[in-house]
Image (cartoon, coloured by chain):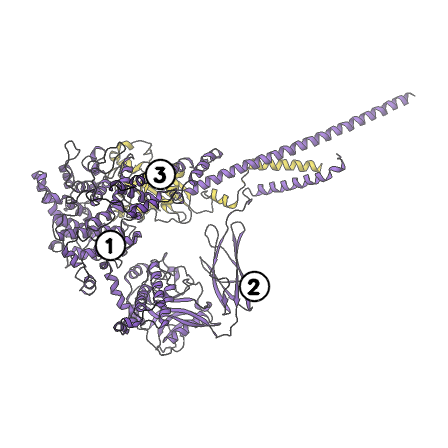
Amino acid sequence: MKKDILAVFGIVLILAVLINGTHVQSVDEYYLTHIDDVTPECKTVTLSIRCDTIFRNYDDLDPALRSKEFVPEDGVILPPTEYVLRDGDTVFDILDRAVRHGRIQMEFQGAEENPFGSVYIQGINYLYEFSCGPLSGWMYRVDGEFPSCGCSRFELCDGQNIEWVYTCDLGQDVGAEWIKESGGQGK
Amino acid sequence: MTLPSGDKGTVNIKKTAVYILSLFLVFSLLFPHAVVTASASGPTLTTTLKDGAVVKNDRLTFDVCARNQAGQKIASTVTHNGERVAPVWEDSDKTSYTLAFTKEGENTVVVSASSDGGRKKQLTYHITYVPTEKGQVIGSAVISVEVFTLGCGYLIEPEFFPIRAGETAAETLVRLLHENGFVCYYGGAVEDGFYLAYIADGTASAETYNGYKKSGTAKDPKKLGLTPSIPDHLHQNLCAGTDFYDPGDYEKNWEGHLGEFVISSGSGWMYCVNNVFPNVGFSDMYLSDGDVVRVQFTLGYGADIGGMSALGGQIPGVENQPGTEYYQTADKDELTFAIANARASGLLACENVRRAYSDALSVALQLDAPQSAADVAASALKSALENPVAETENPAETNKPAETEKPVETEKPADTGKPAETETHAVTDTDAPTDTAGESGAPADNIETDAPPKSPPPLLSIAQGIIDWKKADVGSPKNGDLLCDAFLELAGTTAGDWYPIGLSRIGASDNYDGYLAVLRDKVEERYRQPGRLSVAKATEWHRIILSVLAAGGDPTHFGTDENGQPINLIADGTYDRGKTTPLGRQGINGWIWGLIALDGKRYEIPNGAYYTREDIISEILLKQLPDGGWALSGKVSDPDLTAMAVQALAPYYESEKDVISEKTEADVRQAVDTALLCLSSMQLPTGDYASWGTQNVESTDQVIIALCCLGIDPQSDARFIKNGNTLLDGVLRYRQPDGGFAHSYDHDPDNPASVPGESNSMAGEQTLLAMAALIRQQNGDTTIYDFRSEEGGGDSRVVFSDEDRRAVDDLPSPLSTEQYVTVTALLDKLLQSEDFFGKEEYLQKLTEAKVRISEIQAEIDALNDEIREKLYPFESISLRDKKTVDEIISRYEALSAYDRTKISHWDDVVKAKTQIDTLQRGIIIGAVLAAAAVAASVFLIISIRKKRRRHADEMEELADRFADEDEEEDTGGKE
């Protein structure tokens, strides 16, 4: 009788494990595969990408880009999304991860290829610099402010909010008041 | 249920197995991600202890640095002969322990740390303790007291100073100060809690100073004798980085006392032992034989002397410490040791030793001296000491004690004279006319150092200074080419194309052929992409056109497109640009540079072209602002764009006016005249300009170029001399001691790569262009963007030299994209070279190499695309992707180590692979478990059935028996 109970117990356990799913991993493997999982303890930042300034300058937009595919109806290419912040992550690292995971097109110029020594974002979702007039291009805000350095030089802290915004007027249309003396990601 | 007794053993085994299985199952239920395999490397552990060391002091302080895999600091454990040792100090980086030796002979010290799921790392040290009576000399340390941050050199030059058993570093330091004629004021006690507040004149008599005790009496009292003159770059940092900072504070308030809060709120004494700023104070440190101790005065919480991490340092208010070091500092221990050695050697009378010694001192004193300079100076001094040149060689010189005593002062001016030394190497004689060559010859050194400050250095030496700086920046030797392989990687980018133009326009010889070869290859490659050089930016063409012209190439036939047609950069980038995208799509820049590029050789515009010259000119004129200048946006003129517009219009102001209508000609004339007034009004009293709110050198450079294009001499035109300062004076304000130029002295949010007051690549290239413009004007050459006098390439005979052949023979196998530049340049040269025996073979080898490298590059691109396409988002990775991931991995593994670095986000591939492995493992384990469950069920069912059957049998039997009994009873009853 005892043996039967033991056997039943065993079967129940096995079934429970099977239902629970078997993930047998080492600690390293666990951390590796869960590095980007948002948990209550981990440091995170929020990132969004929008291009609504284009609606006010639609006439300047490259005719080839006048489509919902490139300029979504609400101007939102990526709604605010939380990402795990790894140590030393810059604004560029988070953007790069976000567009890879979100399968959004992005093209940039490497830090060594321009005299500013920082990565320069040329285009996101096929919207490039100068796609909507001579003063258009991508800029970023962190916690509402436009930082004065390139995106691969800005190291992030826990809880910061990054917004990539498309400007059609060298930043003036996205609230960069100081722009009279400056030029976004670097001229 | 009974079983044959022989099977009892099997039952036990089965039972145990079931138990183990159950335990495992419970375990894995409770910890679904339990540790099953432990394969990782675990924590890293380093210490400043040395195994096998012999210690004579009864105390030894050392640091432990323990980190987990994620790089975070973790706790460490130290046992000394089995007994646990408590830490004496911890900071974010390391933990300090002090060993107290009681056991003579070998002592065992074990340092361990564990992390990451219990993995442990352990280091064992065997240290021999030789007890020595307290106070007995146990060796010597090299100690120096440095006030480099005040520009005052050494307070106490490095010397071998005896250390005594049982003596703390504080006691040693106090003895050192007294023997050198100084005293100090300190807090705490020399045995415990010692805090070095001030080092003071030996003649100071007050027993306390600001509440700190005087250390005792100095032998032969001396005054500090300091006249602070804070180095410029440090001055900039301090102005920005400290709450209080007054360079004159020492003379005003502290004369004779140097320590905390003197001159800046971040000042005080710090010390490093063997190039580590210890956590612990002087009184917790015990020195050993051979240590190098540098006591240094900081003005910026340690950030000025490389002591940022030492939060346990001696500086009050470290919480105000800046986030990063102000600049890179070198490990100068070898150098300090060599200086002490030289002083102790008595060989300073020897010419070569003295020279090496004074070189060493000047490097030691430079706060931000690069490591290479420190190493070179140290080894030069060391070898001079090993082979001293007898003093008889130059007896007159050795009788100059002043030079050996104060080598600092004699060395300094030589530094600023450096750029002049090498100019004759890089500038070919044929191109540099005699008057400039004479001016820039040997006497340059003296002119620069002795002449009154108003007289500017020769233009060529300024240009050469920039070239030398840039060579150092890209890692090319001084006598080598600036356009080396590392630089050529950047051909066709904004960072790579302006230097070749500047170089060529001053007539310097360099590797222009290699540059053209790589640039042509890159242009051909980009022409195969949909947007060609750029979708929106016509200036990509313009810059490349100018650099092709500068390097001696032909921009109208520059490589071939995919249809085999010659690439005409002039047509595609200027007059026919409008057929695809308006020239001005990116703004006024496009029109201006389009015109400059078009006029590089005054190219004729064919009939049927999209734009005429007048079209482009009138677009530029149209964009002129009411105040006479031009700007990227807004209504306020910007000096850079105004200057560039003038550069573009300049040919039509005078010489080329016949090609345009009279109306346009008058318009150009008026536009340029008002633009000059506008530029003149924007010039600052210092001679330079501010653009976008930042005073900078590049705007000034562009104005110089504009004036030169018009044939105006910027040095004498009264409109461009302000307060006695010319444009050149304005430019020279930004010249740095390293020969390069700083963008600005202010922080510029617009140019984040530039550090205020530090040489910067863009500032260098534009100043080089301005110097080229001035030099060409002096020599009566064509203006800087007028290439009509340049002969197209192919005029001279190209020889494929032995060196080139060797380079081909030395190509590694297998090839990687690392050889791209080398192979491209060699192949180009070989194709142009004269025939020689074996040319075919080289041609075949290089062509194959070129093809192979293109294939590898294509594979790298494809692999990057594959990763981007197939592996995201991570959540959707399933077993179905196993084949894809395995294939990506095997393709990656087929690449060379260099090429692998070109694969981005490889970590995501590893992650995907791990995920798939886990899923697969889960399925295998699931299958095993399912099989076990089935087996157990079968076993259960069988046993239950058996039991039932037996039960049934028994019942039957019983029934039979009852039936029999009943029958018996029945029959019996009947009877």
Q: Earlier in the sequence, mark 3 or mark 2?
A: 2
Q: What residue would you read off at disc 2?
A: B81
Q: For mark 1, give the secondary structure.
A: helix
Q: Amino acid at mark 1?
A: Ile
Instruction: Tell me residue A65's x, y (percent).
Output: 29, 33
Q: Quadrant of the N terminus of chain B?
A: top right
Q: Amino acid at mark 3?
A: Arg
Tell me the mark number nearer the camera, choosing from 3 and 2.
Answer: 3
Residue B20 sits in quarter: top right
Q: Amino acid at mark 2?
A: Asn
**Residue beneath the point at 13% across and 37% down:** B614
Q: In this view of the protein, which residue sits in the foreground, B311 or B861?
A: B861
Is B670 on the left or on the right of A141, as rendered?
left
Q: What residue would you read off at disc 1?
A: B466
The Cα atoms of the two marked residues, 2 and 1, are separated by 60 Å
Question: Among the chains, which one is yellow?
Answer: A
Instruction: Tell me residue B835's x, y (percent).
Output: 25, 41
The Cα atoms of the two marked residues, 3 and 1, are separated by 37 Å
